[in-house]
Structures are given as structure tokens and as C-alpha cells.
Image: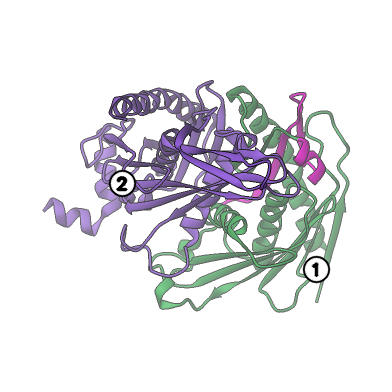
Amino acid sequence: MAAGFKTAEPLEYHRSFLKENCRPDGRELGEFRATTLNIGSISTADGSALVKIGNTTVICGIKAELATPPTDAPNKGYIVPNVDLPPLCSSRFRPGPPGEQAQAASQFIADLIDSANIIQREDLCIESGKLSWVLYCDIMCLDYDGNLLDACVIALLAALENAQLPEVTINKETELAEVNPQKLHPLNVTKHPVGSSFAVFDNTIVIVDPTAEEESLSTATITVVTDEDERLCALHKPGGSGLSAEKLQDCISRAVTRHREVRKLIEEVLKSIKPQQ
Amino acid sequence: MHNARNAMEVESSSTCALREFGCEQSLLSRPDGSSSFIQGDTSVLAGVYGPADVKVSKEIHDRATLEVLIQPKVGMSGVRERAQEQCVRETCEAALLSSLHPRSSLSLVLQIIHDDGSLLSCCLNAACMALMDAGLPMGCLFCGVTCAIDRDGRIVTDPTMQQEKESRALMTFAIDSTERKVLMSTTKGSFSVNELQQCIAVSQRASEKIFQFYRDSVRRRYSKTL
């Protein structure tokens, strides 16, 4: 009976739960799904992380390559993020060129890297005007069940903290770069932004960490990204129903507490893998 | 074809000064609604087609399918345009009463004529004027306002490209006309919660001017045709 109600009237089904201040999966309105993190899951990448928020699974791999720095900024390197939503992760994505959601997510991550200053691009320069690192941050969704952006941000941050780059020196005589794979250095991650996503139901009820079903039934979604200084790095609301200043303030406060939780998780996982090396 | 040409200069007040802005509606003959919106040197041309037939794969059974295309001045549209398209589309979807035209398609094409900062807000304004010109049913109007926070912490509304480059944070909001709520928000750079609240308040104040301009231009236009 309940299954039939859910299929026939999905919105009413969700409303009946929200009326009682809970959600179909048993969570409260302000509760995130269980977040798990695995760091260093791809051995061939320079840094990697796998994040699960409920069923949503996102993996991020960092590959570093050498290149000549951009001519307009000779003392900087490159960070190239890409978010991939393959047909594997949900039936809503078709094979072929990336769809709007994947491109919008890539742009969001690229903007976030600049806005939050996660890595100083100057740190990626090896020799001004000659050699610098390019960090390809490939983020792939393996299972899409809503809240993609939060998972992407955690995966990216954890993978960057996990990344180890070999030491590179330029031979004075031959002017060629010499890579020393024995000496590895971690990246200098200066800021640690964490995102929190919210969905708005019926223009009024705000829930955190929406599932794919909740996202499609909601009237608006919001992603708030904060850093450790409680500054906002992004307030991304691509449209949908209007939001009052008070509701927005609630979202920001929730994002700040979420930041602490996730930060602790990443630090614990990083600490747990250190002794094995 | 009757053209309505309006231009209104907004005096530079202390906190929410906008550049001179203007709009021309129904300037194209083929689209069902069109407009060109100019903010300072930034200029966007918008055309709306619809409600028309929709491809079966894109059909939504209880409302119209809205498609937004942003064409840059040079080159192909890329990832940045796709992200902007998403913002404009979802804002328009919130304002349009699309359930009145189920199983049909609406397409909105935004051609960038010149970009001198505050591009996304200009796109939103052009889109709203074009939707109005097409006579599509809307629950509310919306407008876009861009705010930049410069190095000294001052808020500059409707910044030019130069001001955008010099700013440390940049935010664009879409404000609705009924309750002045934030429909859309996209930001660059980092800022405090207090700065955000100030920028929203400034944008809401600036939106009053734009909505007044909408009202004046529509009134002027229809007083001529009647």
C-alpha cells in the first residue's frame, strides 16, 4: 500500500513525512546521511579519495603532469577539475558528451578552487616561466543519489590532501627537468572548504542533504560552502523558489557545524593512513 | 512592427548605484518575444519561442519544458555558459507558470552582444523582458543584480569588467518582484556572512529601481498602442 502511494503520489508521500518533521528514510529534517571516506583508493593516481554520502558515491583522482606555465601568469600552475556523471551512476544520465548538470558541477568546482584558494597556484610553479605542475582533478560519480556537490567537494579536498608530488629539479647543464620519485612532498592545502546542500520543499520547508528523489521533487536547491574561518566560499542557488534572509541564515549556521564534522572526519582518516606508509 | 524604446538614467546614489540601463522590446520579428537589455556597455539580446511543440524525449507531462541557450559573442558556448544557462533556466522556471502550458516547449535564446561586467544579471533582465514581451504567464517578475566587494570592503553594484577583476568577491542575485526574495544566487571569492547579508540588502534595494523601470517601460509602451 505504501509502495503504491509512493509511486502514484510521490510529492504527497514526502509531504506526509515532512508534516511529522521526518523523512521517508527515517532522518530528521536537519540530518545528513552517514558520510564515509576512503583515502588513497586509486594506487595509480597521485592522490585519490572515495566519498559516500548515503548511497551517493563519488571518487576523485588527482594526476599531476608537467607543463609550461601560462604566459600571462608565469609563476603559476594549473588546476583542471572535471566532474563526470557517467550513465553508470543513474538512469537519468545518457552516454555521450557531458550534460548540463555535469558541466555546471565542473564549473562550480572550478570556481570553488579559485574562490576558496584551496591551493595557491603559485605553489605549483617549479621554475617561473619554464615549468609548473598541472593537477588534473577528475571527479567521477559512481552512484547518484542526490547531493552531488557536497560529495564532490569532500572528495576533491581529501584527494588533494592525500596527493604526493615527486620532487622536480632542473638540471643546470642540460636544462632538462629531473624527477625524483623517491622524494615525495604533500601539497600545501591552505584552505579547507566544505559544502552543505539543502533542498526546499513547497517553498517553505528546508531539508539538508537531499536524496535524488527529494531533489527532483523540491522547488529549489542551495549549496553553501564555508571554510575553517567561517567565511563563505560559495552560496550557490541555481534558481527555484525564493528564500528569505532568515532561512538563509539557518542554512549558513547548519553549514558551519557540518564543516566541523567533515573536517574532523577527513583529519581522522588522514591520520589513520599515515602510519602505514 | 511597433517598437518601444525606453532609456532611463539612474542617478548615482551612495550605496546602490547602477549604470545607465535601458531596454528595447519586440525588436525581432521572428521570435514570439524579444528584448535587448543594456547595462552600461554590457548588452544582451534575448528571443523567446513558444509555447511550441516539444520533442517527445524532453516532454514533461504537467508543465512546459524550458530550454535556455546562451550564445557568447565569439566562439562556441562552453562550460561557463552551460552553468549560466542553468542559473537562468531555473530562475525563469520559478517565475513562469509553466503548468499552464503542459507538454510544450519554451526556448529562450540569449545572445551576448558585449560583455563589460555584470553579464549574468544583464542576461536575467533581458530574459525577463523577453518573457514579458512574449506574453507568457508569470507568477512574478525577476531581475538580476551583481554586487562586487572591492579590496577596501566597499560594495559596488552593477560593476564593470574592470571593477569585477579588481574585486575580492563577486555575487549575482536574482530577486523576485513580489516579496523581494532571492531566487538565484551565485558567488565568486570568499566573504563573511555579514557581507553577504549586506549585499543581499543592497541588491534588494537596487532591484526596486529595475522593477520600477520594468513598470515604466511597459506602461509607456502600452499607452502608445492603446
Do the residues under discs 2 and 1 have CB atoms within 8 angstroms? no
Residue drawn at the location 53% of the way across and 28% of the way down: A191
Tell me the chain of label 2: A
Q: Check the rendered structure and report the hue given to chain B.
A: green
Q: Picture coordinates of residue A176 (x, y %)? A: 63, 48
Q: Check the rendered structure and report the hue given to chain A.
A: purple
In depth, the one of A76 and A66 nearer the eye is A66
Packing grade of label 2 (10 A; few <14, some 14-19, many >=20) is many
Is label 1 in a helix, a strand or a loop?
A: helix
Q: Is residue B96 magenta?
A: no
Amino acid at dot 2: Thr
Q: Residue furthest front?
A: A173
Mark 2 → mark 1, Cα distance in angstroms: 56 Å
Q: Tally the marks.
A: 2
Is label 2 in a helix, a strand or a loop?
A: strand
Using the rendered view, name the quadrant where residue A25 is placed.
top left
Left or right of A11, for residue A177:
right
**Residue ID for mark 2:** A56
Q: Which residues make up the magenta segment?
A: B139-166
Mark 2 or mark 1, which is nearer to you?
2
Q: Are marks 2 and 1 on the same chain?
A: no
**Residue ID for mark 1:** B225
Residue drawn at the location 25% of the way across and 55% of the way down: A9
